[in-house]
Image (tube, rainbow, N blue to C red):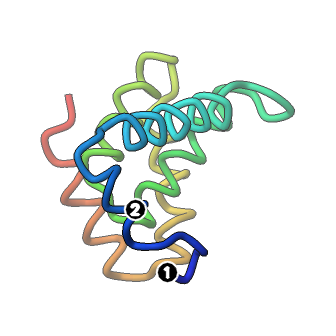
Amino acid sequence: MSCCGGDRDSASSDAGDPTPVLQTQQKYHDFLKSANAPGTLDARTKRLLAISLSVLARCKPCVKIHIAKAREMGLTDNEIDEAAWMAISFGGSPTMMFYNEARKGKG
């Protein structure tokens, strides 16, 4: 019996079926869509938060995607940099070096 209460035989019978994985991925994508939708916080604020959190997580593809989307929304480089500096203030020098590297190739 596993720690989650299922036995190995029932777990292994699903090993070749991609459906549970696809369903989980879809649920995660639905969650992301919901979390990113404007609500109490507007779309600009959420985009700046996404930049800050992506910098703090040091996810280069995420930073590039969120910066590109921020520019499409009309956010300025100063606004984008200020969001990044919030992450840098929490993450320190390694986060600053990451952000500087991730921003190279902007444009």
Kind of residue sitting beneath label 2? Ala
Q: Residues within 10 Å of mark 2 (few under 14, many from 20)?
A: few
The extreme left residue here reads 105
Residue 20 in the image: above or below residue 98:
above
Residue 101, image quadrant: bottom left
Residue at 50% x, 33% y is 29
Of the image marks 2 and 1, the number of the one nearer the N terminus: 1
Residue 6 locus on image (x, y percent): 54, 70
Taking depth in this image into account, of 102 and 61 the one nearest to the observer is: 61
Relative placement, left or right, of 30 versus 106 is right
Q: How many numbered markers are drawn?
A: 2
Local SS, label 1: loop
**Front position in the image: 6 or 64:** 6
Above or below, comparing residue 26 to residue 98 in the picture: above
Viewer-side residue, 83 vs 59? 59
Other-residue count near label 1 (Cα within 10 Å), few / some / many at <14 / 14–19 / ≥20:
few
Looking at the rendered structure, the kind of residue marked 1 is Ser
1 to the left or right of 65 = right
Disc 2 marks which residue?
A: 11
The residue under label 1 is 2
Q: Looking at the image, which residue is at 29% across and 40% down?
A: 17
Residue 99: x %, y % from top left: 31, 60
Residue shown at 41% from the left, 59% from the top? 55
Question: Do the residues under discs 2 and 1 have CB atoms within 8 angstroms?
Answer: yes
Determine the residue positioned at 58% across, 28% down.
Answer: 33
Marks 2 and 1, how far apart at CA? 9 Å
**Residue 92 % position (x, y):** 43, 82
Label number found at residue 94: none
Residue 10 drawn above or below residue 103: below
